[in-house]
Image (tube, rainbow, N blue to C red):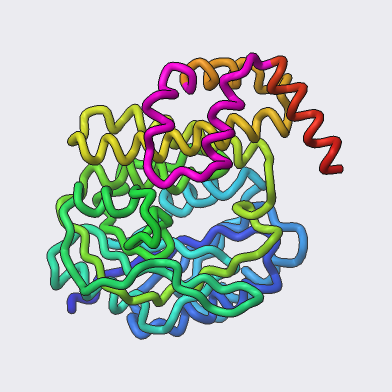
Amino acid sequence: MRRQLISIIVPVYNCKEYLSNCINSLINQSYTKIEIIIIDDGSNDGTSEICDEWQKKDSRIKVIHTNNFGVSHARNIGLDNMSGSYVGFVDADDWVDTDTYELLLREMIEKNAEVSGGGYICNDVRGDKIIFCKRKSKVYSRDEILQEIFSPREPRLLCWELCDKLFKRDLINNVRFNESIGTAEDMLFFWQMMKRVHRFAYSPLFKYHYRMRSGSAVHSGISPKTISSLYAVREIMNSARTENDDLKYIIWKQYVRYLVGCTRQMLVYDAKKYEEDILMNQKEIRREIGRVIRLDNLSIRFVLGVFFLCFPIAICRALTCFIKKRND
């Protein structure tokens, strides 16, 4: 296997409890020709000092300190400073098995693919759990893998997260994270990268360990960050208008779920602040309601949410306030 450099981008913010475990798993990779780019996103809990200590221990570690602008900004800095022919992404509270990047790179080279992916293991207080289906190793075309990844069917083959994948640098040259989007920014970034892909090497490796923390950005409840995920999915849907009918329909189904879910979150979080967005979303839901309620595998809660959002906004706002007060 050719010894080409792999860049591993690690955004870091206030995670001193987990950071050393993460970095340890990277410096002990069986594939040693790596650079580990740690972007400290304005940490104030002692994490910055831990980053600097690790940089002194291993010449492959490069630490960049910035002000706190968020994970997308940190990853963009990492992309701007990488030197590798390949790039992987690791979150600072997660860790990887020692042969992760050797296997991902081998799959990519042997299958002549631009991306390789192997799934991840979720780790929480109850232990480890694989949430994906397992299939034999296979090379997928771009359209095939996107239909697998964006399908609402569970369990999926893979998801759009970047952490369990390795990418050729050429895919990323002109692609950057949208820093105005708080969540699902990785989904949008993945979609934009995949426009250039011809071959995707899948293998059921499950070498990445994803730590599920209650205080993390993904699990911190309703906020402007979570609401902004709708804008990412809307951009993907608009981009998918030129795709084949099957992929276009799968993306639309994902979009509908985000449209309904995020509109309800807007009502709960701050209906006045998001009134213009809510009105626009309601108009779209009413226009598409016949098509929406015919979607398969819809829960009763989702269907009720669709009909609820067809009411005038004043009624939606009043009912939301009433429900919030009862729950309090």
Q: Is residue 162 left or right of residue 268?
A: left
- 302 within the magenta span: yes
Residue 36 against residue 273 in the figure, above or below: below
Q: Which residues are magenta?
A: 285-313
Look at 68% across and 42% down and name the residue there.
Answer: 222
Q: Quadrant of the rendered structure where residue 55 is?
A: bottom right
- Viewer-closest of 30 and 132: 132
- Viewer-closest of 286 and 18: 286
Look at 24% across and 42% down and name the residue there.
Answer: 195
What x and y, as percent, mark residue 111?
14, 68
User: In the rendered view of the protein, which quadrant contains the C terminus?
Assistant: top right
Residue 213 against residue 307 in the figure, above or below: below
Q: Is residue 124 left or right of residue 198?
A: right
Look at 35% across and 68% down and name the residue there.
Answer: 133
What x and y, as percent, mark residue 279?
58, 16
What x and y, as percent, mark residue 20?
61, 77
Main secondary structure type of the part rendered in magenta: helix
Q: Is residue 293 left or right of residue 67?
A: left
- Viewer-closest of 92 and 36: 92
User: In the rendered view of the protein, which quadrant contains the N terminus?
Assistant: bottom left
What x and y, as percent, mark residue 189?
39, 44
Residue 27 against residue 142 in the figure, above or below: below
